[in-house]
Image (tube, helix red, strand yellow):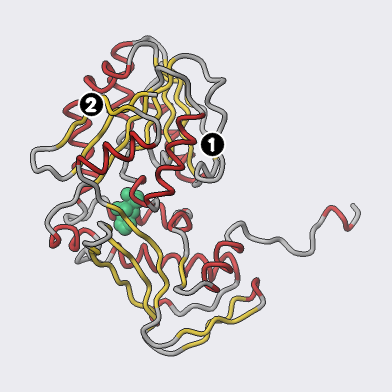
């Protein structure tokens, strides 16, 4: 074998984001980098903490209304799920779908191949009449070609992932989803709603520290994938409700002045004591901001389902 087949340097796909993010002021690392295998597992554990209400609230809404959602979406549906992860809540929609049609196609899209592998195994075991075609892709970067898929599409974007986008990014993203669809296709989106600040705060500061571990996993991942030398105990998890901007912010705050060397980037990064890396925004919505976002993106809001406490909303919109 010739040397040319074996590159001397293999650059991790996260290198660019980490380099530009840690060079920026304020420093920031995009939340999609949370989801390596360990991070995906930690997120699953977050959803099981008593404080983290979004997943179980959305699941309760789906449990209650999946049949209505599928009926509202139309006949002969092909399901696409963006950011499918383990696709655990999707089971409820698939069950409702397979009550109305003999067979269905399901295209789960996610950046995490490990999460998709898990989803594929479980779905194949549960639903013999479902044909699953997983797509490993960063759908924020480029959407898979959905136009060519058969039947009327129902695109699922549940789990309040939309909250991770900046408002203008959310609009641009939903516009690109709309462009990839055809008239009559539908979109089902999960939105976390604005609520009591204490409830919001607790959800991102759980007593067991799972969210803190999830946040710090960003540093663990950089250490492993880029030869970083972060001491995870030298940073603390910070999460708070920013009312003015209607979002939860998560940061990692340097406890001391320190310099962290990242081998694969060939440089060190100096942190002042108290300096933060911004790792996530999780925007919260109300009826008005949901309607406005969908309208500006070229969708028409058709129906909304909200739990009794008014904590979470699942919205069906039409192209
Ligand atoms: C997966 C984006 C919905 O914003 O609540 C959970 C991720 N971050 N705890 C969220 C998350 C911290 C979550 N989303």
Q: Which mark is residue 303?
A: 2
Question: Which residue is the extreme one toward the right?
Answer: 2
Left or right? Give the position of 76 relative to 182: left
Estimate how packed mark 2 is, as few (under 14), some (14 to 19) or many (20 or more) residues with alpha carbons within 10 Å: some
Task: Report which quarter residue 154 is drawn in.
Answer: top left
Tell me the SS state at disc 1. Answer: loop
In the rendered image of this protein, does residue 234 appear above or below residue 65?
A: below
Residue 251, given in percent of the width and then of the height, sits at 36, 70
- Residue on which the image places disc 1: 143
Which residue occupies the foreground of this view, 201 or 44? 201
Residue 45 can be seen in this image: no
Marks 2 & 1, CB-CB < 8 Å contact: no
In the rendered image of this protein, does residue 205 appear above or below residue 146?
A: below
Residue 12, given in percent of the width and then of the height, sits at 63, 60
Residue at (49, 36) in percent of width and height: 176
Residue at (53, 45) in percent of width and height: 138
Residue at (48, 58) in percent of width and height: 33
Which residue occupies the foreground of this view, 46 or 245? 245
State the quadrant of the C terminus: top left
- Gap in angstroms between the C-alphas marked 2 and 1: 25 Å
Residue 112, given in percent of the width and then of the height, sits at 49, 47
């Amino acid at each position: 074998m010739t040397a040319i087949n074996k590159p001397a340097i293999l650059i991790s796909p996260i290198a660019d984001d980490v380099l530009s993010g840690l060079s920026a002021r304020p420093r920031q690392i995009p939340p999609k980098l949370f989801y390596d295998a360990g991070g995906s597992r930690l997120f699953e554990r977050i959803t099981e903490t008593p404080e983290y209400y979004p997943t179980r609230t959305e699941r309760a809404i789906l449990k209650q209304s999946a049949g209505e959602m599928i009926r509202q979406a139309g006949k002969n549906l092909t399901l696409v799920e963006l950011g499918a992860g383990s696709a655990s809540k999707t089971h409820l929609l698939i069950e409702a779908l397979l009550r109305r049609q003999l067979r269905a196609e399901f295209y789960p899209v996610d950046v995490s191949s490990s999460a998709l592998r898990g989803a594929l195994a479980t779905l194949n075991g549960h639903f013999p009449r479902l044909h699953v075609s997983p797509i490993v892709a960063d759908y924020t970067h480029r959407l898979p070609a959905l136009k060519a898929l058969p039947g009327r599409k129902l695109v699922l974007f549940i789990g309040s992932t939309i909250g991770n986008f900046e408002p203008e990014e959310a609009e641009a993203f939903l516009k690109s989803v709309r462009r990839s669809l055809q008239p009559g296709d539908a979109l089902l989106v999960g939105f976390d709603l604005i609520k009591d600040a204490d409830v919001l705060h607790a959800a991102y500061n759980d007593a067991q520290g799972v969210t803190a571990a999830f946040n710090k996993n960003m540093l663990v991942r950089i250490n492993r994938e880029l030869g970083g030398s972060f001491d995870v105990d030298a940073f603390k998890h910070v999460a708070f409700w920013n009312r003015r901007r209607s979002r939860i912010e998560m940061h990692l705050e340097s406890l001391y002045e320190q310099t962290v060397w990242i081998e694969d980037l060939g440089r060190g990064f100096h942190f002042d004591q108290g300096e933060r890396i911004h790792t996530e925004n999780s925007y919260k919505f109300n009826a008005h901001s949901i309607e406005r976002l969908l309208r500006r993106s070229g969708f028409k809001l058709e129906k909304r389902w909200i739990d009794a406490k008014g904590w979470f909303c699942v919205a069906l919109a039409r192209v």
